[in-house]
Amino acid sequence: MSSTWVWNLDPEVIEFFLRIRRSRLVELLTTGDFALYTAANCFSLLGTWMQRIACSLLVWDMTRSPFWLGVLAAADLLPTVLVGPVGGAAADRWDALKLNRLSQLALAAVAGLLTAFVQFDVLTLGLLIAIVGCIIAMGQSARMTIVQELVGRDDVPVAVAINSMNVNLARLIGPALAGVLIVLFDVVWVFMFNTIATLIFVAVLQRIVPNADTPKQPRGKGVFSEIWQGFRFVASDHGTRLMLLLLLAGGALIRAIAEMLPAFAAMLSAVPATGLAALTTSMAFGSVMAGLTMNIYLSTPRLPVQIAVAWLMSACAAAAFIFGNSVWTLAVFAMLMGYLTSVSLIATQTYVQLGTPPVLRGRVLSVHGLIFRASPSLGALVLGLSSDAFGLKLPVFCSAAIMLVVVLLFMPAVLRMRFHPEEISTRH
């Protein structure tokens, strides 16, 4: 009976599934070195998110202090500010694949130390998390730069979307899996899982052969001179400057609202933990769906307009937060916001990847990473302080309204932009 059903399918339905099978998204996920890299990277990111949850739990158990949770977050974030630009210069000077291997091997060693220290109750968690943050910051640009060495230039938007899906899947599944391991076994098993996952990623990186070599920065200039060259390109290139200013505004004014989800859950749910789980899961689901679907409509020549429109719509979704009268209504808005902000983020990184000369790509991506990581933290600080004074809804609405004004002010310049990435390699 099942065989008859298959053969009686409408030809249009069959053609639809064949188109899916032939899509670049499916092909990149199932064939070649990029598919292997993606699978191992996903496993590694899962371990990273599990370790983050375990570290937060350990710090809370040791201190019972929100202040020390903030210190832990700072230990993870500050290296991006201090070390990230150096990592960008390194990615432009040396082989990105080798830098990825070295950084992941170092992360595996630190994860092993964390496992041992937790097992034997040696309380040096903060120092090791700061070391992890430094290693991640050093390798972040190389991790993004390697995309163009594993896929063709035309596949960069899809590859960036896949990497975004990886991060959001890990963010969605990692905390739940960490909770299961901690409840059923012990917190040390979370650190052990991350060690093994990172070592598997290292082994996979050893097997990968890049499809293309990216031109490297000639040696001779000092590191700080090279870092300054990256910042100078961002400041002087009109399109990159506009896109990164939108990223800065979107991070501080829209993505920062995600940090307020615990307060919304407590305000609207009888069981705050359940409400928070519903909101965070909905936002992460929206982000994953963005990665799965945006390759259908993403257009490289129209990237600047698509980025601006996505930020505009995400501001509208954020403004709707104040009208949510239940957790489940708010979950719908959170899913929309997760989808639209992810479209903006994926499209912005695609713009930077394609719109930067190859010899500068690592350094410009480090500036992108700096803004990407730091802007939500700064925005959340302002939102938290203003919410203490004026309540939660007014600051969130004002934040969304300011973002709307910012995008509308930028829109005339964005509409005049013409993005032709095929001409980039001829510059610099």
Image (tube, helix red, strand yellow):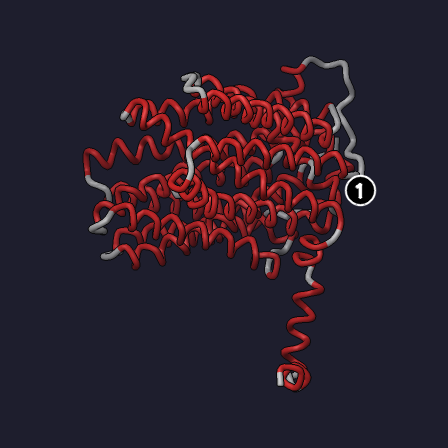
- Please indicate whether residue 94 sits to the left or right of residue 68 in the image: right
Element at badge 1?
A: loop
- Quadrant holding the C terminus: top right
Q: Hey, which quadrant is residue 45 in on the image?
A: top right
**Residue drawn where x is 50% and y is 46% of the image:** 168
**How many numbered marks does the figure carry?**
1
Residue 83 in the image, given as x and y percentages of width and height: 56, 20
- Please indicate whether residue 10 sits to the left or right of residue 287 in the image: right
Residue 11 in the image, given as x and y percentages of width and height: 67, 82
- Please indicate whether residue 239 sits to the left or right of residue 68 in the image: right
The residue nearer to you, when weighing 284 against 273, is: 273
**Residue drawn where x is 56% and y is 59% of the image:** 293
Residue 414 in the image, given as x and y percentages of width and height: 54, 47
**Residue drawn where x is 62% and y is 31% of the image:** 141
The answer to whether residue 232 is seen in the rendering is: no
**Residue drawn where x is 72% and y is 51% of the image:** 154
Amino acid type of disc 1? Asn
Residue 221 in the image, given as x and y percentages of width and height: 72, 14
Q: Residues within 10 Å of mark 1 (few under 14, many from 20)?
A: some
The answer to whether residue 53 is seen in the rendering is: yes
Q: Does residue 62 lie above or below 408 as drawn?
A: above
Residue occupied by mark 1: 211
Q: Does residue 193 lie above or below 221 as drawn?
A: below
- Quadrant holding the N terminus: bottom right
